[in-house]
Amino acid sequence: MRRALESVVAKGGGKAAYIEGYRVGGKTGTAQKVENGQYLVGNYIMSFMAVVPSNNPEAVLYLAIDNPKHTALLSSYTTTPIARRILLDIIDALDIKKQPNELEKDLEWTDKETFKVPNVVGKSVADAKKLLTNFNIEYTGTGEKVVSQSPEANTKLESGGTVRLLLE
C-alpha cells in the first residue's frame, strides 16, 4: 500500500508534492459537500494525505481545504503544492534522511529535464568538461585537477544548472 501511495506522488495526481530524494506517499481527494441530503453546487472539500518516508513512515500529513475559491476543482492542483511546502518543513524539523530506491517522478511538459551530476573529483579539467556537458561549470582555482565539486556526485540537477568545481 505504501508503494502505491508513493506511486501517486511520483506518477499520478500528487506530483506537485514530489520531493527529490525522499520517498513521499500520498493520495488526493475531492469531495462534493452535502446539505439536507442534496449535493451543493460548486462546494467541495479538497484534501491530500501524505506519509514521509513512505517505506518507513515518520510523519503523516492530512491537509484539507474547505470550499477553495478561484481554483480548478481538482485536489491535485489545489492541495499538493501546499502539502509539499509543509512536508519540506516536516523533513527539516524531524531531520528525515534521504531514502534510497525512490520512484522517479514522471515528467510533465512543464518540468525541466534533470540529470545526475557525475563524479569528476580527481579528473582533469578537460575530462570534467566532457562529463558535465549538460551543465554550466564555474571554477575556483587555477589548477588542472578537480579536488572538490558542488553539488556532489549523483545529485540530480536541471539541465543547464551550475556545477562548481574547486581546482587544485
Image (cartoon, helix red, strand yellow):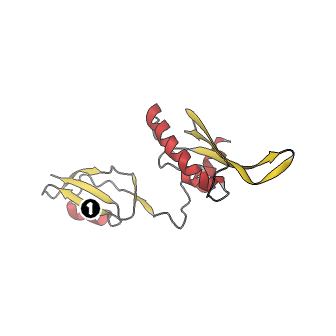
The reply to whether residue 131 is visible in this rendering is yes
Instruction: Please identify the quadrant where the N terminus is shown.
Output: top right
Q: Taking 26 as reference, is 90 above or below it?
A: above
Q: Residue furthest front?
A: 36
Rendered image quadrant of residue 158:
bottom left
Identify the residue at image location x=73%, y=52%.
43
Pick whichever, 93 or 161, lies toward us: 93
Q: Position of residue 33 (x, y in %)?
A: 77, 47
Q: Secondary structure at mark 1?
A: strand
Identify the residue at image location x=55%, y=53%.
16
Which three-letter amino acid code belongs to the residue tagged 1? Answer: Ile
Identify the residue at image location x=45%, y=64%.
113
The reply to whether residue 57 is visible in this rendering is no
Q: Position of residue 123 (x, y in %)?
A: 24, 56
Q: Position of residue 136 (x, y in %)?
A: 29, 64
Is residue 116 found left or right of 125 in the rendered image?
Answer: right
Tell me the residue that label 1 is attached to.
Answer: 137
Q: Residue furthest right?
A: 37
Pick whichever, 118 or 161, lies toward us: 161
Q: How dense is the environment of label 1, judged by Cα within 10 Å: few (below 14), some, or many (20 and up)? A: some
Is residue 107 found left or right of 146 in the rendered image?
Answer: right
Identify the residue at image location x=44%, y=60%.
114
Is residue 16 found left or right of 155 in the rendered image?
Answer: right
Q: Residue furthest left?
A: 142
Q: How many marks?
A: 1
Is residue 28 found left or right of 93 in the rendered image?
Answer: right
Q: Position of residue 41 (x, y in %)?
A: 77, 55
